[in-house]
């Protein structure tokens, strides 16, 4: 018997030995669900295979990979399940059939499960669930607990999602001492998640340490590794065991970043000079290259430069393009973002609009609440085409706002630096252009000197807001402002509209 015919039969026997259910008894004789076989082999050229199901109730099939079609994936009582796949080699899957709390496991195999030596390009183009061995350079490490990083071999780049340690354990990535620039060989199964090709829980076959490493970046004249917006020089301190150092600056950064000097030896330095930055924060990832005469080795470092902060209203922020530019907005916290489990996200509103500030640094620590007037700084981002401020921070609680009744407001001392939130029913509109009106709680009456569309409104932006918002006598109106007295009349001034009910 030839080996190529014997091996699939051996795989089938082994798979059947290790196939089972959540209990130790034979999977075909569970009372709740029985199957005609718990191992299914599909032709590498593509095709289908079926099994019979006998079930006492409703059942569902789960853990189905993208490359496999299951029909039907659920049912009730007895039936037949068909498994289908296009042409593929070396793919496996374990499916779960659940009925009345019991789990039956079905193993699917298509072709011989071999490990293929491949380039990154071949991995990207290859089928899911196939195991590949690939060699390349570590270009970026994004998680040092599970070991998530990027591997590039010149033909493409593959995301590594999870790296096993030398004993096959997880969450021990740091034991490898892996660094950007190291050359490494790994093997693992391919999957595709949200369009990203991944090798999952890879086994490390070989690591060849890079002959060059960037130990640190030092900005001249400051205790920081970020260049100021005025520009300046930053020094890359290297360790090099190869011959010579070459520097690559990405084309898009060459207009503002250049090399001014280098030194040689085992610990060379490269000094860069950055031009003044009139825009937002910017960065460039530079590469350092050396050779041992046979192979080329590389290391990288990211040079960051602070940018100017542009003060804008919400409307101008929404109109800006997504970028790393820094923007400053001052407005009222109009609400919290309930979908954020960390509680750091909120909406800010001024006279021109409303926008989500996503996970602002310092928000929780500030104690800021809905109604407070705050200043935030961040970048223009978007999620599913919905604009939002990202990578931001709450810079200042400009005016804490205290919610009070009309009676309490009338008793407060005059102050232009203390803001209150007051709610009442409109019983008279004295000026429709600027929104001068009276609020009442049924007993007390308060004069509002101007109802403007939001914080920051000036000039014509203050005019005709009541008509534009459809606010009329009888509506319940919530305003923010400070207390003042003019000719004996107590007034709510500042005129920041918050909300109203018809």
Image (cartoon, rainbow, N blue to C red):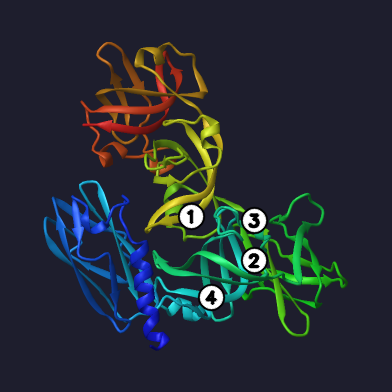
Q: Nearer the viewer, residue 350 or 382?
A: 382
Residue marked by disc 2 = 284
Q: Which residue is mark 1?
A: 380
Q: Is residue 445 above or below residue 105?
A: above
In space, the residues marked 1 and 4 are separated at their CA atoms by 40 Å
* Mark 3 → mark 4, Cα distance in angstroms: 21 Å
- Tell me which corner region of the image, top left, top right, bottom left or bottom right, holds residue 297: bottom right
Query: Pointers 2 and 3 in contact (CB under 8 A)?
Result: no
Q: CA distance from mark 3 to mark 1?
A: 35 Å
The answer to whether residue 79 is left or right of residue 381 is left
Q: Secondary structure at mark 3?
A: helix
Q: Closer to the observer: label 2 or label 3?
A: 3
Q: Furthest residue to the front?
A: 1
Number of residues whose C-alpha sits closer than 10 Å to that of mark 1, classed few (under 14), some (14–19) or many (20 or more): many
What residue is shown with label 4? 133
Secondary element type, mark 1: strand
Image quarter of residue 472: top left
**Residue 43, percent across and down?**
29, 81
Q: Quadrant of the C terminus?
A: top left
Q: Are marks 4 and 2 in contact (CB under 8 Å)?
A: no
Q: Residues within 10 Å of mark 3 (few under 14, many from 20)?
A: some
Q: Nearer the viewer, mark 1 or mark 4?
A: 4
Asked whether residue 111 is in view, the answer is no
**Gap in angstroms between the C-alphas marked 1 and 2:** 19 Å
Crowding at dot 2, Cα within 10 Å, few <14 / some 14-19 / many 20+, comes out as: some
Q: Which residue is labeled 3 in the image?
A: 174
The numbered mark, 3 or 1, whose residue comes first in the sequence reads: 3
Upstream in sequence: badge 1 or badge 4: 4
């Amino acid at each position: 018997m030839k080996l190529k015919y014997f091996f699939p039969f051996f795989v089938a026997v082994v798979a059947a030995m290790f196939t089972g259910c959540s209990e130790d008894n034979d999977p075909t004789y569970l009372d709740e669900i029985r199957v005609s076989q718990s191992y299914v082999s599909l032709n590498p050229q593509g095709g289908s295979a079926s099994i019979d199901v006998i079930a006492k109730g409703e059942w569902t099939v789960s853990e189905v990979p993208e490359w496999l079609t299951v029909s039907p994936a659920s049912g009730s009582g007895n039936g037949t399940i068909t498994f289908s796949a296009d042409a593929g080699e070396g793919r496996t899957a374990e499916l779960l059939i659940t009925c009345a709390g019991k789990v039956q496991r079905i193993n699917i195999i298509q072709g011989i499960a071999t490990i293929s030596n491949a380039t990154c390009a071949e991995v990207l183009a290859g089928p899911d669930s196939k195991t590949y061995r690939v060699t390349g350079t570590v270009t970026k490490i994004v998680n040092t607990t599970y070991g998530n990083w990027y591997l590039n071999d010149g033909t493409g780049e593959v995301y590594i999602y999870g790296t096993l340690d030398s004993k096959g354990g997880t969450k021990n990535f740091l034991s490898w001492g892996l660094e950007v620039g190291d050359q490494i060989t790994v093997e693992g199964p391919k999957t595709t998640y949200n369009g990203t090709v991944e090798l999952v829980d890879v086994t490390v076959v070989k690591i060849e340490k890079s002959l060059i490493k960037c130990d640190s970046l030092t900005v001249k004249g400051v205790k920081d590794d970020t260049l100021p917006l005025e520009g300046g020089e930053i020094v890359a301190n290297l360790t090099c065991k190869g011959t010579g150092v070459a520097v690559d600056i990405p084309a898009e950064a060459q207009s503002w970043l250049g090399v001014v000097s280098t030194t040689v030896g085992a610990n060379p330095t490269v000094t860069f000079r950055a031009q003044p930055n009139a825009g937002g924060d910017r960065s460039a990832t530079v590469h350092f290259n050396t050779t041992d005469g046979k192979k080329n080795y590389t290391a990288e470092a990211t040079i960051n430069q602070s940018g100017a902060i542009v003060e804008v209203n919400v409307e101008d922020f929404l109109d800006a393009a997504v970028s790393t530019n820094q923007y400053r907005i001052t407005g009222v916290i109009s609400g919290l973002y309930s979908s954020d489990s960390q509680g750091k996200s909120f909406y800010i509103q001024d006279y021109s609009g409303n926008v989500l500030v996503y996970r602002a640094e310092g928000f929780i620590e500030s104690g800021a609440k809905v109604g407070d007037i705050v200043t935030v700084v961040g970048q223009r981002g978007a999620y599913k085409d919905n604009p939002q401020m990202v990578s931001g921070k709450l810079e200042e609680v400009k005016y804490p706002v205290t919610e009070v009744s009309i009676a309490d407001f009338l008793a407060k001392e005059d102050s232009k630096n203390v803001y209150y939130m007051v709610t009442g029913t409109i019983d008279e509109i004295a000026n429709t252009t600027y929104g001068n009106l009276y609020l009442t709680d049924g007993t007390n009456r308060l004069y509002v000197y101007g109802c403007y569309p939001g914080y920051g409104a000036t000039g014509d932006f203050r005019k005709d807001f009541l008509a534009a918002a459809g606010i009329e006598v009888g509506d319940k109106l919530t305003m923010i402002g400070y207390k003042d007295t003019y000719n004996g009349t107590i007034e709510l001034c500042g005129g920041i509209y918050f909300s109203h009910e018809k």
